[in-house]
Image (cartoon, helix red, strand yellow):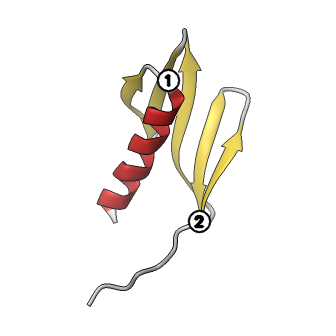
Amino acid sequence: MSKKKDIEIQVVDTDAGVNLVIGKKVVAEIIENDGKFLLRENSKDKAQYKNYSVALEEAIKNYNLSL
Protein backbone atom coordinates (compact mmCIF):
# COMPACT_ATOMS: atom_id res chain seq x y z
CA MET A 1 0.00 0.00 0.00
CA SER A 2 1.19 3.47 -0.75
CA LYS A 3 1.28 6.14 1.88
CA LYS A 4 -0.35 9.38 0.87
CA LYS A 5 1.70 12.19 2.37
CA ASP A 6 1.31 15.87 1.74
CA ILE A 7 4.50 17.53 0.55
CA GLU A 8 5.14 21.15 1.41
CA ILE A 9 7.06 23.01 -1.27
CA GLN A 10 8.53 26.43 -0.53
CA VAL A 11 9.34 28.84 -3.34
CA VAL A 12 12.16 31.05 -2.09
CA ASP A 13 13.02 34.22 -4.01
CA THR A 14 16.76 34.74 -4.63
CA ASP A 15 18.86 37.26 -6.55
CA ALA A 16 19.22 34.91 -9.53
CA GLY A 17 15.64 33.58 -9.57
CA VAL A 18 13.78 31.20 -7.27
CA ASN A 19 14.68 28.04 -5.36
CA LEU A 20 12.23 25.20 -4.75
CA VAL A 21 12.80 23.89 -1.24
CA ILE A 22 11.31 20.70 0.19
CA GLY A 23 12.17 20.23 3.85
CA LYS A 24 15.71 21.54 4.10
CA LYS A 25 16.75 20.47 0.60
CA VAL A 26 16.86 22.70 -2.47
CA VAL A 27 15.45 20.44 -5.19
CA ALA A 28 15.49 22.89 -8.12
CA GLU A 29 16.35 26.40 -9.20
CA ILE A 30 14.51 28.46 -11.78
CA ILE A 31 16.60 31.27 -13.23
CA GLU A 32 15.28 33.95 -15.58
CA ASN A 33 17.58 34.55 -18.53
CA ASP A 34 16.62 36.82 -21.47
CA GLY A 35 12.89 36.32 -20.95
CA LYS A 36 13.22 32.53 -20.69
CA PHE A 37 13.34 30.38 -17.58
CA LEU A 38 16.16 27.90 -17.02
CA LEU A 39 15.40 24.88 -14.85
CA ARG A 40 18.44 23.65 -12.91
CA GLU A 41 18.37 20.46 -10.81
CA ASN A 42 21.35 19.01 -8.93
CA SER A 43 23.56 21.84 -10.28
CA LYS A 44 22.82 20.72 -13.86
CA ASP A 45 20.82 22.66 -16.43
CA LYS A 46 17.80 20.52 -17.34
CA ALA A 47 15.68 22.60 -19.73
CA GLN A 48 14.64 26.08 -20.73
CA TYR A 49 11.00 27.21 -20.81
CA LYS A 50 9.15 30.21 -22.21
CA ASN A 51 7.17 30.90 -19.05
CA TYR A 52 7.66 30.55 -15.32
CA SER A 53 4.59 28.44 -14.56
CA VAL A 54 5.66 25.67 -16.96
CA ALA A 55 9.17 25.61 -15.46
CA LEU A 56 7.72 25.39 -11.94
CA GLU A 57 5.34 22.58 -12.94
CA GLU A 58 8.16 20.57 -14.57
CA ALA A 59 10.39 20.97 -11.51
CA ILE A 60 7.65 19.57 -9.27
CA LYS A 61 6.92 16.72 -11.70
CA ASN A 62 10.60 15.78 -11.86
CA TYR A 63 10.85 15.72 -8.07
CA ASN A 64 7.74 13.53 -7.70
CA LEU A 65 8.99 11.08 -10.34
CA SER A 66 12.36 10.72 -8.63
CA LEU A 67 10.86 9.65 -5.28
In the image, residue 5 above or below residue 48: below
Residue 51 percent coordinates (x, y): 48, 24
Residue 16 percent coordinates (x, y): 66, 26
Q: Which residue is mark 1?
A: 37
Q: Where, quadrant-wise, is the C terminus in this rendering?
A: bottom left
Residue at the spot 54% in from the left edge and 38% down from the top edge = 29
Residue count near mark 2 (Cα–Cα under 10 Å), binned few <14, some 14–19, many ≥20:
few
In the image, residue 19 above or below residue 64: above
Residue 44 percent coordinates (x, y): 40, 34
Residue 28 percent coordinates (x, y): 50, 44
Amino acid bearing label 1: Phe
- Left or right: where 53 falls relative to 17: left
Q: Is residue 42 visible?
A: no
Residue at the spot 37% in from the left edge and 60% down from the top edge = 64
In the image, residue 14 above or below residue 12: above
Q: Quadrant of residue 50?
A: top left
Counting labels gives: 2
Q: Which tag, 2 or 1, sits closer to the chain's start?
A: 2
Amino acid bearing label 2: Glu
User: Disc number at residue 7?
Assistant: none
Q: Residue furthest left?
A: 1
Q: Secondary structure at mark 2?
A: loop
Q: Which residue is mark 2?
A: 8
- Left or right: where 32 falls relative to 50: right
Q: Quadrant of residue 10?
A: bottom right
Residue at the spot 73% in from the left edge and 28% down from the top edge = 15
